[in-house]
């Protein structure tokens, strides 16, 4: 927490001098986080006083920057940010296609620019040049920026021999109604933060950095519950009102790394993917009008869990193991044979597991009053064939939830390991 001591009272003239000093400091590259720390110590806040001053002395007991603003994820590390962090309140997913002539050299320059911008923004700093000041008043707010390569990237850069077998296109599924213009892409960027302006600021910076090297193929916006909105930490709910992510693998599990990350040796993947992961991205529309016509009991039977607390229908709490053999007085299975939670269990899919890290989305209401809303599904795994594909094939054969959802776009991206100090993301591929 920031220092909460009572600030020294100051005159408007002193406030103006300090405001000018802060503007100068910002131009010198002082981070937003450090600037806010200075503001907390001197007692300034940006106000609506108007006139020439523009700053007002803050009340003696004003609240310092909350922990949600000071949260900071590290850009450099073994894995890229945006995989192991918890769900974030705001998110943007965007895919780019390289422009004609960009090639390997242009892609390397772009990833170098993007990596430096991500490093700066995640540390609470502005961009190196032309910062828009959208997030000037905010701390890092847990910002994460993650980069991945699509199947088509390797042909465009002459790196086909370095394309992982694991990046082969996903098979077709019966619930797919995919829009090809909103699927795949040469490059993929995931942006997440716990403040909407911080997330947008990063999106705008990434788009500007693309310059003439790449153009946006598609872009999607998402959200989750804000940190601190519940009395205690809870599994998030999706737009169907269901707890979503109860069975997510946990880093404390002994086989977590082998399920989620590509090993540094002994892998079928090329060496540049060491400590990386594969992201499956799906825009899944929820047919909410149909879903909301179901009774509570019908909804719970579709999912296999209690809506109120996420507990399995077989009893217990959210974390209780589901008893798949339990029957009721009539001899019927308590957890229906086609319940979503039954079908997706790792022990029903040869141990297949994915780390789910989705965002909800709402893109408006059409002329018939039907909401275009659902889930921006993002899942991580070391091997998409053993992870997503295995589970989705099982769901394709009889998931009760399939009647109430529609997969409208899809992408699979190779996300390399984190960049070491002095490196940019993908450097071992592009300069190897």
Image (cartoon, grey):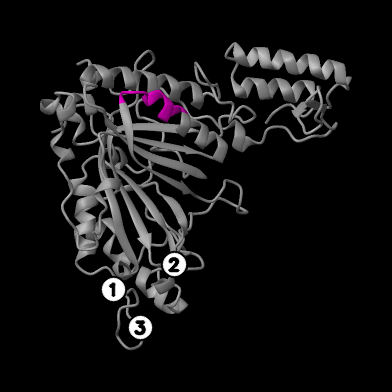
Q: Secondary structure at mark 1?
A: loop
| Residue 378 position in % (x across, y down) | 35, 46
Q: Residues within 10 Å of mark 1 (few under 14, many from 20)?
A: few
Q: Residues within 10 Å of mark 3 (few under 14, many from 20)?
A: few
Query: Residue placed farthest to the bottom in the image?
Result: 330
**Residue 370: mark in rendering:** 2
Residue 336 point in image, percent of width and height: 31, 75
Measured as percent of width and height from the top left, residue 223 is found at: 49, 48
- Of mark 1 and mark 2, the one earlier in the sequence is 1
Tag of residue 253: none
Is any part of residue 195 visible from this angle? Answer: no
Q: Residues within 10 Å of mark 2 (few under 14, many from 20)?
A: few
Q: Is residue 47 above or below residue 338?
A: above
Image quarter (top left, top right, bottom left or bottom right) of the C terminus: top left
Task: Look at the numbered discs 1 and 2 and tell me whether their residues touch, using CB distance below 8 Å.
Answer: no
Q: Which residues are magenta?
A: 205-213
Q: Earlier in the sequence, mark 2 or mark 3?
A: 3
63 falls in the magenta region? no
The label on residue 325 is: 1
Q: CA distance from mark 2 to mark 3?
A: 37 Å
Above or below, 130 against 342 in this view is above
Q: Is residue 326 visible?
A: yes
Majority SS type along the magenta span: helix
Secondary structure under the numbered disc 3 in the rendered image: loop
Q: Is residue 211 magenta?
A: yes
| Quadrant of res 406 | bottom left
Above/below status of 31 relative to 227: above
Name the residue beneath numbered marker 3: 328
Residues 354 and 279: in front is: 279
Tell me: 429 left or right of 238.
left
State the CA–CA distance, disc 1 to disc 3. Answer: 10 Å
């Amino acid at each position: 927490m920031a220092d909460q001591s009572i600030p020294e009272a100051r005159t408007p003239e002193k406030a103006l001098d300090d405001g000018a000093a802060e503007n100068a400091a910002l131009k010198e590259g002082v981070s937003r986080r450090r600037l806010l720390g200075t503001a907390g110590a001197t007692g300034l806040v940006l106000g609506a006083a108007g006139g020439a001053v523009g700053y007002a002395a803050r009340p003696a007991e004003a609240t310092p920057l909350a922990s949600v603003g000071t949260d900071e994820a590290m850009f450099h590390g073994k894995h890229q940010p945006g995989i192991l962090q918890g769900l974030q309140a705001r998110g943007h997913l965007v895919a780019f296609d390289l422009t004609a002539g960009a090639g390997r050299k242009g892609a390397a320059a772009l990833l170098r620019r993007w990596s430096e911008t991500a490093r700066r923004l995640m540390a609470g700093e502005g961009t190196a040049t032309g910062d828009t000041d959208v997030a000037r008043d905010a701390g890092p707010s847990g910002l994460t920026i993650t980069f991945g390569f699509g199947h088509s990237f390797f042909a465009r850069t002459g790196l086909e021999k370095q394309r992982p077998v694991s990046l082969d296109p996903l098979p077709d599924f019966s619930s797919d109604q995919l829009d090809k213009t909103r699927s795949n892409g040469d490059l993929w960027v995931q942006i997440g933060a716990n403040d909407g302006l911080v997330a947008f600021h990063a999106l705008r910076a990434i788009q500007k950095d693309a310059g003439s090297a790449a153009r946006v193929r598609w872009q999607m916006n998402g959200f989750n519950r804000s940190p601190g909105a519940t009395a205690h930490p809870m599994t998030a709910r999706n737009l169907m009102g269901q707890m979503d992510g109860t069975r997510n693998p946990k880093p404390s599990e002994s086989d977590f790394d082998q399920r989620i990350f590509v090993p540094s040796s002994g892998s079928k993947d090329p060496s540049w993917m060491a400590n990386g992961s594969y992201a499956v991205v799906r825009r899944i529309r929820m047919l909410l009008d149909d879903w909301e016509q179901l009774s509570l009991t019908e909804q719970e039977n579709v999912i296999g869990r209690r809506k109120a607390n996420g507990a399995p229908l077989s009893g217990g709490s959210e974390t209780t193991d589901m008893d798949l053999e339990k029957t009721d007085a009539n001899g019927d299975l308590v957890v229906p044979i086609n319940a979503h939670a039954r079908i997706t269990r790792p022990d029903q899919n040869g141990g297949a597991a994915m780390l789910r890290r989705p965002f909800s989305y709402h893109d408006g209401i059409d002329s018939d009053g039907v909401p275009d809303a659902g889930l921006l599904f993002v899942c991580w795994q070391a091997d998409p064939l053993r992870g997503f594909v295995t589970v989705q094939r099982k769901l394709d054969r009889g998931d009760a939830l399939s009647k109430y959802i529609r997969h409208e776009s899809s992408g699979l991206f190779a996300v390399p390991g984190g960049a070491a100090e002095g490196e940019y993301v993908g450097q071992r591929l592009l300069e190897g």
